[in-house]
Amino acid sequence: MALPLPPGLTPAEVAFLCEMEMVTVVPRQQLKSHDLLGGPTPALRPPHRAPLPLWLALLLKRQRRANIVPPPWLLRSSLERILKEETEISPTAFSRPPPHPHAISAIPSATDHKSPPFLASSTADAPSGHLPYHWLELGEILLQACSDDVSEPDKVRTLLRDLREVRMAKMRSITKHLEGGGVVSLEGVGAMEVAEGRQFVVGVMDGLRKLGASREAERRRREEEGGSGDGNSEDDDMEMEME
């Protein structure tokens, strides 16, 4: 009998899905178009840039057939600006996610609509100053597989670590609002942050639910005891009047 699976995606599964994100490559040699499940890939002709899924870009990088262009948000200046927004401008909220490339009213059909997290938010044309949905795992993958393509990789790695610590502290502080019955917005939270923080947040919510249930049971018990006590006192008064 198979054991029940935990709710949600694990960090390993999130990292696997991240490899479907689109990145920009600079090919070193020509490569014909290939038909994939997500559609045909563009024909690669050096030195023209082309968008490819991350898994294919990593394969070509290992074969030294292409270089990967880091997204604008992975630059040092952009990460420093985002870190300042997270710590000084909005210390209690998460930085804004990338803007949607299309207006909802301008989308002709649902089949043409690309919803998060698979927007083109990690290509060379993506806007800077916004962390995409797979920012954490994508940044770590690029720094590990193609650090030579990233400008100032050591500084970028440090900034990513600082951003992770700051944002995880915000995730933990969410439990204070949950305890008071408040509504919490998770806009801008990344996929890996959700996967890593789910167990902690769900555990806190379960504890609060059990605590609330015990308080409700205690309140009902007191009401029942109070009601039975009032009834006994009224019976005693009636007996005294009859005597």
Image (spheres, rainbow, N blue to C red):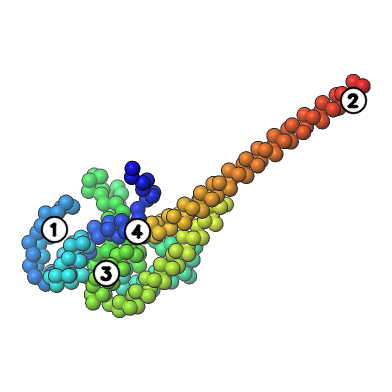
Residues at marks 1 and 4, CA–CA distance in whole angstroms: 28 Å
Task: Name above or below for residue 202 compared with residue 156.
Answer: above
The image quadrant of residue 59 is bottom left
Q: Position of residue 110 (x, y in %)?
A: 25, 45
Residue type of the residue flagged with mark 4: Pro
User: Mark 3 sits on what residue?
Assistant: 142
In terms of sequence position, does the residue under pointer 2 or pointer 1 come before the other? 1
Residue type of the residue flagged with mark 3: Leu
Residues at marks 3 and 4, CA–CA distance in whole angstroms: 17 Å
Residues at marks 2 and 4, CA–CA distance in whole angstroms: 73 Å
User: Mark 1 sits on what residue?
Assistant: 41
Which dot marks residue 240?
Answer: 2
In terms of sequence position, does the residue under pointer 3 or pointer 1 come before the other? 1
Q: Is the Cβ of the residue at disc 3 closer than 8 Å to that at disc 4?
A: no
Task: Name above or below for residue 123 compared with residue 208.
Answer: below
User: Position of 141 compared to 225: left or right?
Assistant: left
User: Position of 42 compared to 168: left or right?
Assistant: left
Residues at marks 3 and 2, CA–CA distance in whole angstroms: 88 Å
Residue at 49% across / 60% down in the picture?
Answer: 172
Identity of the residue furthest to the front in this view: 1
Residues at marks 2 and 1, CA–CA distance in whole angstroms: 96 Å
Residue at 27% across / 71% down in the picture?
Answer: 144
